[in-house]
Image: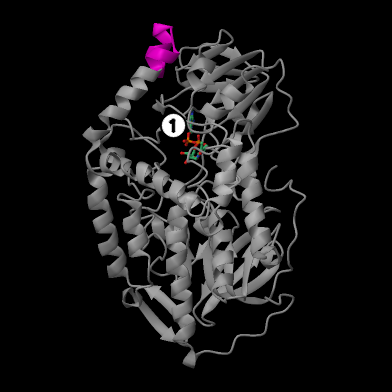
Amino acid sequence: MTANSSTKSAGSELPRHARVAIVGSGFSGLGAAVKLSEAGHQDCIVLERGNDVGGTWRDNTYPGAACDVPSHLYSYSFAMNPNWTRSFSSQPEIQDYIRGVAERAGVLDRHVFNCHVKRAAWSEENNRWELSTTRGSMTADVLIGAFGALAEPKLPDIPGIDRFAGTLFHSAQWNHDADLTGKRVAVIGTGASGIQIVPAIVDKVKHIDVYQRTAPWLLPRFDRPFTRPERWAFRNVPGLLRLARAGIYAARETQVVGLAKYPKMMKPFELIARAKIRFEIKDPELRRKVTPNFRIGCKRMLIANDWYPALDNDHVELVTDGIREIDGNAIITNDGTAREVDALIVATGFQVTDSPMFDTICGSDGRSLSQTFADGGMRAYKGTTVAGFPNLFVLIGPNTGLGHTSMVYMIESQLNYVIDAIDTMTRRAINRIEVLPDVVDAYNDTLQRKLAGSVWMTGGCGSWYLDAQGNNTTLWPDFTFRFRQQTKRFDIDAYQTSSTADTEPVPALSGHTG
Ligand code: N01
């Protein structure tokens, strides 16, 4: 199911005005809708370009799609699920979970589906956001940008790819009508998506060429179905779910010491990964090709038990020569070899640091987020508020990303901050908050100092964690509980504020009852 193919939509019409407009309904936007509702802010609306909730989990329906964070942690703390069927859930199960949360929280009627936000501009005159969408226009006092980091597929810039003669699609826009049975297939990309796709299709295709630009480090995947007694216990033993969650959280958090502070401490992980290569691959040449040339952790560490065995098949070729061009249905590498295929799957990731959504959001001086970020990269305060963009909260914003544990934990931390900010604005009749530029500078200076010694900056790799200028504007460089502490309360002193006394009353809502 892609953003446009779901039939599950149930939602509302676009109102003329809402107190809070949320753009996007993945884990972060949906979480915001639920938490706002719980906090009594019923006048909010979620504008979702697809026709279901779920975001990246709705869109990434490729074969083998599954999470690499255990399910008991990769879920909302306020909607824990005793019924996960296995330790690492598959995409359909996660999507069902997200949909179930939305239904049980009763927030689906606050969604406008198939509603693409084309532009959101802050009006200094009216002290509100003016939104133009494919379903009409509206205004909002507060805008929550929950459009996600893994939302916009990135296509490889390969000469001739636009004229590829066979079937071509991105991993996040899987073409379920394309039957790969008995076909010659090429997969470009060996990141988290590519290494799940290849093992899932290897047995049905005639041949696969896997184009690897950089070999990833791989660790074992301790995945298994939960037994019936375990699931019974998760449902019935008080505190067990929370305990399981805490255990997973603590175990994952220990990685921060090596990743962010002392990269040399990642060595034991590297030894495990090297042993895995020796154990799972016999061919010395293939072993050499899959052995990374950078320190483990620099790029996201991947987990899989079926990747190396899949590559070790006779009908699979791991191609490590760079791609020069595509001609007709042939992929031509730098050494001049042409390999013909029927289908080309590009598992080449997402536009994270240059999301097209950044072009559509314009602040108080009319400049867009992309123009603002053009100098020195994406920058925010606590990953959430941006100088020059009043009453805007960005979820999964700059430097809130993680490679080692659950993003849902970071999202919930941000939600604490955002809900407290909106509560504070309501309580104190504040109608405009804007983070002070000095505060943003100081915050980011500290972040960058911490990042400087991290494996992501020193490990000798390129990755989507870095932008085109080499700035790491994506990752949180510390224990995640530190982010939780920082975002526990809205710190109004970091903001310039103004009160409602000077502004016009807001027109009544139309078509949306809250
Ligand atoms: O994308 P990626 P992804 N020519 O950017 C290669 C999450 N996720 O969709 O490493 C040739 O990681 C690129 O090569 P290189 C997770 O956060 C989670 O796989 O840049 N190759 C790389 O191999 C993850 O980090 C899960 O040299 C090109 C690959 O394409 C994020 O999503 C599952 C190329 C892109 O890897 C993104 O993962 C899936 C080119 N022009 C995703 N351009 C789980 O939880 C790019 N590449 C399991």
Query: In the image, which residues are magenta?
Result: 277-290
Q: Where is residue 16 in the image (x, y as percent from the top left)?
A: 68, 76
* Residue 188 seen anywhere in this rendered image of the structure: yes
Taking the magenta stretch, the answer to whether it contains residue 74 is no
Locate residue 493: give its quadrant: bottom left
Q: Say what secondary structure mark 1 lies in.
A: strand
Q: Position of residue 469 (x, y in %)?
A: 34, 44
Locate residue 421: give its quadrant: bottom left
Query: Which residue is more in the foreground, 202 or 391?
Result: 202
Q: Is mark 1 within 8 Å of ligand 1?
A: yes
In the image, residue 357 above or below residue 283: below
In the image, residue 174 above or below residue 351: above
Residue occupying image coordinates x 52% and y 46%:
150
In the image, residue 211 above or below residue 229: above
Which quadrant would the N terminus be assigned to in this image?
A: top right
Residue occupying image coordinates x 42% and y 44%:
248
Residue occupying image coordinates x 51% and y 31%:
223
* Residue holding disc 1: 302
Q: In this view, does 102 lie to the left or right of 221?
A: right
Q: Is the magenta stretch mostly helix, strand or loop?
A: helix
Toward the bottom, the furthest residue is 501
Residue occupying image coordinates x 45% and y 46%:
244
